[in-house]
Structures are given as structure tokens and as C-alpha cells.
């Protein structure tokens, strides 16, 4: 199997500090409203009124850090009419801003809402896996920024061998359509995407393409 770069995110260790999100915005000088990496605040359960007293029932909360999944079957690449999206030999999916016409087809097709329109530039943008740093032997900015070391990166098969195959935590969509290059580490409360009962608490931070 050809090399496929991927991220590993340990939900059990993530505390939702959003240092990864901030590092991504800073490194890529992203304008307001564009977040290539987002941290979903997800919670569920309820408070039940028993004789005038509110009792917690199956309450849970956790955080899911997500960016472009650099999918093995990137639907964004398939639908781009300008052929502006390509997949490198190492599996990293990139948008060529010299070819992009800003039609937004990729953002409509992507189930993860990864491509986001930069109004100032008039083109689509997304996580590049910090390919410029990778090519110099460095690490993605989000990985280095995580104070709890909840983020890793590497070859997908190696990450799966180390951490397992879990790739569909709620609130993310079903992974079967695009085969995302991602591995998640679950905690005891993590729901799966097709059995979700909770809800996203920070929709204002999520790109409209995903919400």
C-alpha cells in the first residue's frame, strides 16, 4: 500500500483548549471566520426533574479535533471542475490556488466541511497538513502545539497498528463515503457517528459548510 499521511487524535486526552486550532490559524495567517482545524464541543444526556430536584441522567461531554481528513477517496478532488485539487504521493490533498476558480463545489461535496472559501483571495482553502513543514522534516503546527500530546501524525497504517481503526466519533459523519485518513482514540463516553444522541455546543465556531 502506498504511503498515506494521517492524523491521530486521542479524544481521551483532549481537553478542548483549542491550542491546535489557534496554532493552525497563526501558522497559516487565516482570516476571521476560517478555521482549517476545528475543535467540536460535543455533549449529551439530560437533567431529569425528580420531585423538584434536577438529577443528571447519562450526561457526557468530550472534544473532537478535526481538520481536512486527506481522504483516501477525496470527493473534493473528484468534483473540482478546474482540476485544482490533487493528492500527493504521500496522500496529502492540496488545493492549487492558481487553478481554483472559487466555485465551492468541493465544500458542498466534502462531508467534513474542510474546504472553506477565502473571500479576500476568491479561492477555496483548507488544511495542507503543513506540507511545507513536512517537506523540511518538521511537524504539523497543530501537533506541536498540543500541550497534552493528544495529536500525532504519521503513516496511516502505522497509526492504525499502534492505535486501532476507530475513525467515526460523533459528531463526525460516516467515514465510508471518503475513507478519511484519520484515527481517533476514544474515551468511555465517545459515541459513534451513526448512533449519535448528543449535539454540538459550539456551532458558531464551525464553518457553515459543516453545520
Image (cartoon, grey):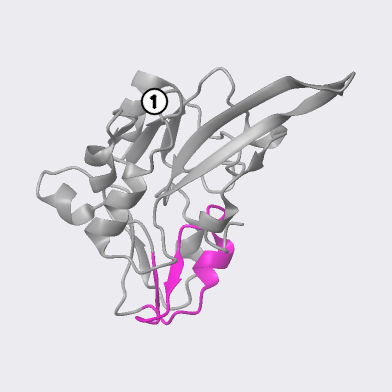
Residue under the point 42% across and 79% down: 119
State yes or no: residue 169 in magenta: no
What is the crowding at mark 1: few (fewer than 14 residues within 10 Å), some, or many (at least 20)? some
Q: Nearer the viewer, residue 153 or 119?
A: 119
Residue reaching furthest to the right: 51
| Residue 202 pos. (x, y %) | 56, 49
Q: Nearer the viewer, residue 59 or 172?
A: 59
Residue 206 visible in the displayed image: no
Residue under the point 16% across and 51% down: 133
Residue under the point 34% across and 40% down: 6
Q: Quadrant of the C terminus?
A: bottom right
| Residue 109 pos. (x, y %) | 57, 62
Q: Is residue 159 above or below residue 146?
A: above
Q: Which residue is mark 1?
A: 160
The range drawn in magenta is: 100-125
Q: Nearer the viewer, residue 91 or 18?
A: 18
Label 1: element kind: helix
| Residue 23 pos. (x, y %) | 27, 50
State yes or no: residue 113 in magenta: yes
Residue under the point 35% across and 63% down: 86
In this rendering, the count of numbered labels is 1
Q: Quarter of the image holding residue 196? A: top right
Residue 18 visible in the displayed image: yes
Amino acid at each position: 500500500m502506498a504511503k498515506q499521511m494521517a492524523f491521530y487524535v486521542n479524544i481521551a486526552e483532549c481537553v478542548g483548549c483549542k491550542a491546535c486550532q489557534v496554532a493552525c490559524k497563526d501558522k497559516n495567517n487565516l482570516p476571521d471566520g476560517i478555521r482549517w482545524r476545528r475543535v467540536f464541543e460535543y455533549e449529551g444526556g439530560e437533567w431529569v426533574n425528580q420531585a423538584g430536584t434536577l438529577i443528571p441522567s447519562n450526561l457526557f461531554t468530550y472534544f473532537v479535533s478535526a481538520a481536512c481528513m486527506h481522504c483516501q477517496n477525496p470527493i473534493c478532488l473528484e468534483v473540482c471542475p478546474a482540476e485544482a485539487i490533487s493528492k500527493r504521493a504521500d496522500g496529502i490533498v492540496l488545493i492549487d490556488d492558481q487553478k481554483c476558480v472559487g466555485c465551492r463545489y468541493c465544500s458542498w461535496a466534502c462531508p467534513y466541511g474542510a474546504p472553506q472559501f477565502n473571500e479576500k483571495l476568491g479561492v477555496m482553502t483548507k488544511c495542507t497538513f503543513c506540507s511545507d513543514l513536512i517537506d523540511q522534516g518538521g511537524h504539523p503546527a497543530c501537533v506541536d502545539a498540543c500541550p497534552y500530546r493528544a495529536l500525532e501524525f504519521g503513516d496511516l497504517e502505522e497509526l492504525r497498528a499502534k492505535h486501532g481503526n476507530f475513525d467515526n466519533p460523533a459528531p463526525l459523519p460516516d467515514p465510508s463515503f471518503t475513507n478519511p485518513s484519520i484515527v481517533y482514540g476514544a474515551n468511555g463516553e465517545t459515541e459513534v457517528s451513526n448512533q449519535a444522541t448528543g449535539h454540538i455546543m459550539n456551532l458558531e465556531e464551525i464553518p457553515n459548510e459543516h453545520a
